[in-house]
Amino acid sequence: MTVVAQDPQSERPAQHATKHPQRDETPDAKKETWTEVVNRRQLKRDHKATTAAKDLRVVVGNGSDESVKSCPPIQHIFVYKIARDCEPESIGALMKNKGVSPIDIRKTSKSSWLSSSFRVSIAKEHFNQVFSEGFWPQGVRCREWIARISTGQPPTAEVANTDLEHEELPHGKQNTTENDG
């Protein structure tokens, strides 16, 4: 027997509970137990604010001040197929030895995976230098970072490299594109 109950105090979706009879053959066999099943669906983010912000007029300053300066354009790259014991400090040291100072390096892989992957933020002026075969050790792969975007929009480099908050894609969904040859 399945019972559906709506919580009148909130706008949460209905919760389902299933009634199970006891299995033992005792005189209390007529007693029944209840198991509560809770809806574990994740709430989806409302992208209305993000969409509205993109449509607003933007003013770019042209004055000068010594204490407040704009940041240089940033490019994000995805570096993967690296030995799993590699840490962000090792990637930073490699890049500094080659003349590039990374702005940020974030490990995007889990320790249980067979290889490591990183999101590396660099100044846009260093992109061509970093995005070349000779920069990385043999077997290490590099591509532009693709930001998480709302469903139905094709990923583009323009979207991937905006100054908006970047979210990492769950690797279970992109494992074939990032880790395949």
Image (cartoon, rainbow, N blue to C red):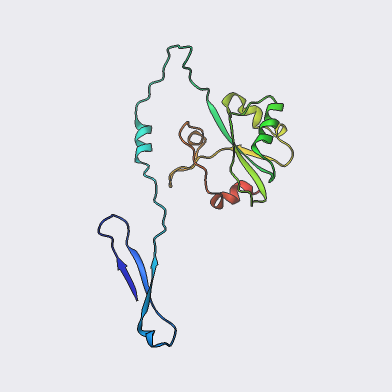
Identify the image quadrant of residue 19. Answer: bottom left
- Identified at 37% across, 24% down, the residue is 58
Q: Residue furthest left?
A: 8
| Residue in front for this viewpoint, 37 or 77 | 37
Q: How many marks?
A: 0
Q: Is residue 30 left or right of residue 99?
A: left
| Residue in front for this viewpoint, 69 or 141 | 69
Locate the N terminus by quadrant.
bottom left
Q: Residue furthest right?
A: 138
Residue 156 in the image: above or below residue 63: below
Q: Position of residue 94 (x, y in %)?
A: 70, 31
Q: Is residue 80 left or right of residue 37?
A: right
Q: Position of residue 176 (x, y in %)?
A: 60, 51
Identify the image quadrant of residue 131. Answer: top right
Identify the image quadrant of residue 62. Answer: top left
Residue 9 in the image: above or below residue 128: below
Residue 39 in the image: above or below residue 144: below
Q: Position of residue 96 (x, y in %)?
A: 68, 27
